[in-house]
């Protein structure tokens, strides 16, 4: 199948770019002498996880339990569930099962209540809960503040319990995505590392050793500072695909962006000297994040068409205008022809697609990837392993169907 034969909207992933992005991050972490524990949340595809771990199938971070369960089912080990665990019977039960099944399954906590709960929850054969302490080093989303008494209390409890294996500290520098004139990605990275190292030293004076203390965000790990040599782990995720946001943060070049959404033009419209086109890509196929932040000012960047702007998204369709507000020369964009949109945020865009079409550099579709689906449900309920790939009849029908909202 050629790209031109795809049903639209379709998510296309360029395999050679994915491999290059993964290799580049691997080389970068080795240069800085830091272990890479990559995040699975962007692709949610087992084949990509194999590439991220160089075939070892060890050392990944996940955001959902279906992700962890899918990886475990496919022979992966040493998995960190990087969302604060709470007293949720379903999640506790599933984390217990993963902890007992794998040689290393780690959970993350940031409250005394959860720590006490895990201390009172026995694993089979006397196995210990493996726990990271989520530490807030400046992002202020979640975690125990790095210089707080709460963090010390938590660390002491985890350290002294015979049922707990205290792994160390984990922090996310998500504020590296939200910069202003006074801060750069490198400023954020150095601030986070400084706070993290101070916490490690503070715990050391209390006799509490941190085996691991890492930070992560694709912007910081794509342009690391010398300070980042001093941590033990990096946890980037978005780097496998990158996106327009990362390009704007100087994490990558546009040529590094490995995914895009293919869409077809399904209508030409003119009224009172103004014109626009309609495409079959709405907010069910492309994230609405980043409006006005991309160079065109719209949603995502239209590949090789800087003159066009994806001005509006409804559920299944998008509206395209000229960036300068002039009328569109429809002859340049025939109905049925394809446009390709680079997403502002690839994680959010990919999560909307049940299948990724994998392309080579010649524009041939060489594979189809099926990501893990679902957020919190068990695998039986979310049906994540029983997804039915589209049949030839599905593809033919979909490519003929151009229904849209007025």
Image (spheres, rainbow, N blue to C red):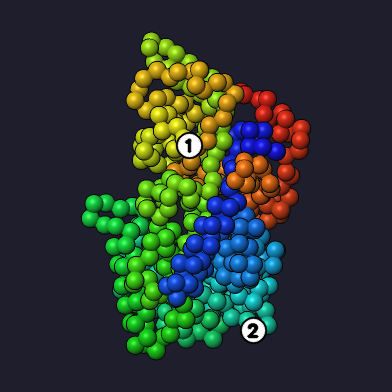
Which of the labelled discs sits on residue 126, or is there none?
2
Q: Which residue is mark 1?
A: 303
Q: Residues within 10 Å of mark 1 (few under 14, many from 20)?
A: some
Q: Is residue 265 left or right of residue 153?
A: right
- Give the total number of marks visible in the rendering: 2
N-terminal of the pair, mark 1 or mark 2, is 2
Give 94 or 68, whichever is nearer the viewer.
Answer: 68
| Residue 180 in picture, x, y percent from top left | 27, 51
Residue 378: image location, x then y, percent: 66, 57
Quarter holding residue 210: bottom left
Q: Position of residue 64 (x, y in %)?
A: 57, 58
Seen as rendered, the residue at the extreme top is: 272
Q: Is residue 191 left or right of residue 171?
A: left
**Residue drawn at the location 62% of the way across and 41% of the way down:** 363
Q: 382 or 284: which is nearer to us? A: 284
Local secondary structure at mark 2: helix
């Amino acid at each position: 199948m050629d790209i031109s034969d795809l049903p639209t909207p379709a998510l296309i992933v360029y395999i050679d770019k994915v491999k290059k992005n993964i290799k580049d991050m691997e080389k970068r972490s080795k240069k800085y002498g830091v272990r890479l524990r990559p995040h699975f949340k962007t692709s949610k595809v087992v084949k990509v996880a194999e590439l991220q771990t160089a075939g070892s199938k060890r050392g990944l971070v996940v955001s959902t339990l279906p992700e962890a369960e899918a990886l475990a089912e496919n022979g992966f080990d040493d998995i960190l569930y990087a969302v604060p665990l709470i007293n949720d019977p379903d999640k506790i039960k599933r984390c217990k099962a993963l902890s007992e099944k794998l040689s290393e399954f780690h959970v993350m906590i940031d409250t005394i209540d959860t720590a006490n709960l895990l201390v009172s929850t026995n694993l089979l054969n006397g196995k210990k809960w493996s726990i990271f302490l989520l530490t807030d080093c400046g992002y202020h989303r979640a975690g125990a503040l790095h210089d707080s008494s709460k963090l010390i209390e938590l660390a002491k409890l985890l350290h002294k319990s015979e049922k707990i294996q205290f792994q160390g500290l984990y922090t996310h520098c998500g504020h590296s995505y939200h910069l202003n004139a006074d801060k750069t990605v490198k400023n954020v990275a150095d601030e986070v590392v400084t706070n993290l190292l101070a916490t490690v030293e503070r715990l050391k004076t209390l006799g509490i050793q941190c085996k691991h203390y890492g930070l992560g965000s694709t912007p910081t790990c794509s342009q690391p500072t010398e300070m980042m040599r001093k941590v033990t782990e990096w946890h980037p995720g978005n780097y496998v695909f990158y996106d327009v946001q990362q390009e704007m943060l100087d994490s990558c070049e546009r040529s590094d962006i490995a995914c895009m959404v293919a869409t077809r033009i399904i209508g030409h419209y003119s009224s009172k000297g103004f014109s626009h086109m309609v495409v079959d890509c709405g907010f069910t196929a492309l994230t609405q994040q980043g409006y006005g932040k991309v160079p065109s000012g719209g949603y995502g960047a239209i590949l090789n068409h800087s003159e066009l702007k994806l001005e509006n998204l409804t559920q299944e369709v998008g509206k395209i205008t000229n960036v300068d507000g002039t009328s569109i020369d429809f002859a340049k964009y025939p109905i049925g022809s394809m446009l390709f949109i680079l997403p502002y945020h690839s994680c959010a865009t990919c999560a909307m697609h049940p299948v990724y079409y994998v392309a080579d550099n010649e524009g041939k579709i060489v594979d189809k990837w099926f990501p893990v689906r679902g957020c919190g449900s068990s695998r039986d309920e979310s049906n994540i392993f029983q997804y039915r790939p589209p049949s030839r009849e599905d593809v033919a029908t979909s490519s003929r169907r151009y229904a849209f909202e007025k």
